[in-house]
Amino acid sequence: MSKRRFIGFVAGIPLLVLILIVIILVSEPEPEGISRGLAYKSAALLLTDRESCEKALADQKQEYFPEAEKNNWYVKYMSFLYAGGYLDSGKVPPKKETAEGFLTYKDAEDLAEALVSGAGKEFHVGKKKRNRQVSADEWWNLYGELQKTLDGEGKIRELDVLLYGTPKNVTTASPWTAYTSEGNYQFEGISLDSYIDWELKLLVKGNEIIAMREAVSDSVTYKNVWLTTGDGDTFGVNIGSVKRSFPLEASMGQPEDFANHLADLTLKKGRLSKVTMKKKRISGKVLAVREDSIEIEGYGNLKLDKDFKVYRLYGQFEERSISDILVGYDIQDFVVAHGKLCAALLVREFDAKSIRVLLMNTNFQSIFHPSVTLSAESGLILSYGEESVEVPAKAEVVIDPSDERLKEGRIVVSPLEKGDSITVNSISRSYGTPAYSGTIEIRKDKEGLLLINELYLEEYLTKVVPSEMPDSYEKEALKAQAVCARTYAYRQIQSNSYSKYGAHVDDSTRFQVYNNLPTAAKTQEAVRETYGKLLFYGETPIEAFYFSTSCGHTTDGSVWGGDPSKFPYLDGSLLQDNKGVLNLSTNSDFEEFIKNKDYPAYDASFPMYRWETSVTNRQLEEEITEVGSILNITVTERGVGGIVKKVRVEGSDGTMTISGEGQVRAKLGNQYMVLTKKDGSVMKNFESLPSAYIAIDNQGVDDKNITTFHIYGGGYGHGVGMSQNGAQAMAKEGKSYEDILKFFYHGAEVHEANQGKS
């Protein structure tokens, strides 16, 4: 090569490098951006939630978007920001092109500054770059900083999920619904369809996905899913609330080998790579359900798999929760693998034939006992582990926490002769030393011994009804009480309030008082003659609330702050033949009503129909300490029938509101109260007001600076559902128990759980 050519070659290298650099810069793709709609959605969710944006959009007076666009997903979020002054509609036009365009540095700067003063400087750039799109990473990095300031309560959180469904593969899905291992979420404006069967890291608030922060893995394992038959060479899989279908390769086996079994499914890049079947099942009566274990008769206490599932197999398949596993019943099978329970299979419907009752100590102070003393006329059988021992007739056996027989966890005590009762000599009830049908199970707990009485539900009711209603009452009233008590018990068994202790209810007023008074022939007949009868609204047993005495008017299901539409059968009405509803929402109207001692109603002849009492501010200040010296008390809100829902208390140091009938009764009642009933008799030692059907009269201040409040009241109890004394009066007039129940529970019908409507 000549010298001249060599020099030209060397001189051309820098030029070639420069050309290559220019080509790279020109052809380099712009970093992935983020749409304005998605950025504005994420900003709105820093300030509020999706539901509030939807409500604000429905209530707003100013329409920002054109009519044709108002149903687009981003409209509610951007409208919220416009209305709050976080977006300027002049600079950011409210239209589809704006929302679907990319967020620019100028957009990001203005939005960040509007959200948090000074935050916009992160995106402050020169004029040439202001209209260039911001990268998604840049936006989410800033978002994390904004979150520290605006999400002090930590409502926005990161979530690791397995995504198994979107409207792309779930034909019945609602728009923008993502089905994940952590529940169902909305994902408006986010592209998730291509990530089905991926493990993802999401940013969420409530049930709305703000962003997909990371695609973690395209390999997932769905644990403890339920397999079903498919079509041809496929098998069905229930994953959460979604039913999917997978091809069945010949090497995997026959369809019948898969159907109706539990399995783990592993997928790679959306393709099935492994199926691990779990076929071992056990069954037995459930003795206790705890957070991390279930105790099953014959198997002991078994730990739960981390991905433990509960499936209802009878009727329509459904995934349920651990709270649906009922203690005292063997209506479920369990799938076991590696020594742990992987799933509970609810295989038949609950029939409410038996109930498990925690027996409290004397005076119903605690569910725990320091020791237990038992006996029976015929003698006892004590069963523990694989052993059992007999106790002679009438002999007492004493068991304390150190008893070696409790090392297996429990002792089950039965009478030697069927039909005999077990006497618990270590506790007392109103009628003396109580005796119990069925069996008594003794469990050891760190706080003492637990006594669980398991018996037939119908037998239980024979000892509930006399404790809740005097056996001197009319038979039809007692039958109405029996149906209410049965319905209440049915729902309580399903609620599993005491499942960790292996029981359904206790025997106190927290549920239904049980075996506090002796049973009688009439109450036994009332239970027997209504055998199995429950109160239903549609296909669901109702909340059969009841109380002692009305003031002439019942109230609705909102008295405890709930939604009354959930209890349409608890509507509140006058206790007269034609029912009807009085408007007693004002204090003046209610005062006129409650001062009328002879207002006609079924309960009008009972002493607690009307009552009155006086209380001083000094007495009230022992309980109400927040406002200083009490100056006045005013009812500010009444419910159906005039029941008090809110009271304002004014004091020298401010005011406060007492909400809810229970709190009103507790706060305004006190130990000094003397109540005068309608018949002139008095009642003392009553620390809570009998009801919240009250009118309050401020009688002024005396020379000792004491303010006296006179309270006019009516009724005894919460006022929801059936008045027991009202039922008694109706029965005396010749009304049947079904007439009585249909009067108090509007639209409800009486029939057995496994029968159609009567």
Image: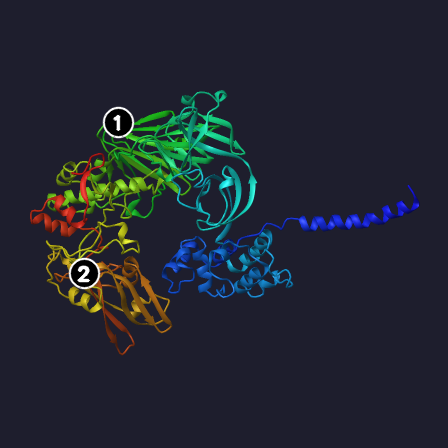
Nearer to us: label 2 or label 1: 2
Q: Farthest residue in the right direction?
A: 3
Asked if residue 402 is positioned above or below residue 191 in the image, the reply reads above
* 681 with respect to 441 (left or right): left
Of residue 304 and residue 112, the one placed in the foreground of this image is 112
Q: Quadrant of residue 257?
A: top left
- Name the secondary structure under disc 1: loop
Mark 2 or mark 1, earlier in chain: 1
**Amino acid type at mark 1:** Leu
Q: Which corner quadrant of the image does residue 148 belong to?
A: bottom right
Badge 2 local density, few (<14 within 10 Å), some, or many (20+)? many
User: Spatial distance from mark 2 to mark 1, Cα to Cα?
Assistant: 51 Å
**For residue 416, which numbered disc appears in the image?**
1
Residue type at mark 2: give it. Gly
Q: Is residue 517 visible?
A: no
Q: Residue at x 49, y 66 (%)?
A: 90
Report x, y in % for residue 12.
83, 48
Residue 295 at what x, y percent from top left?
39, 33
Look at the image and tell me in which quarter the C terminus lies. Answer: top left
In front of the other: 650 or 637: 637
Q: Position of residue 395 (x, y in %)?
A: 27, 31
Q: Which residue is mark 2?
A: 714
Position of the N terminus, as image quadrant, is top right
Residue 171 relative to residue 19: left or right: left
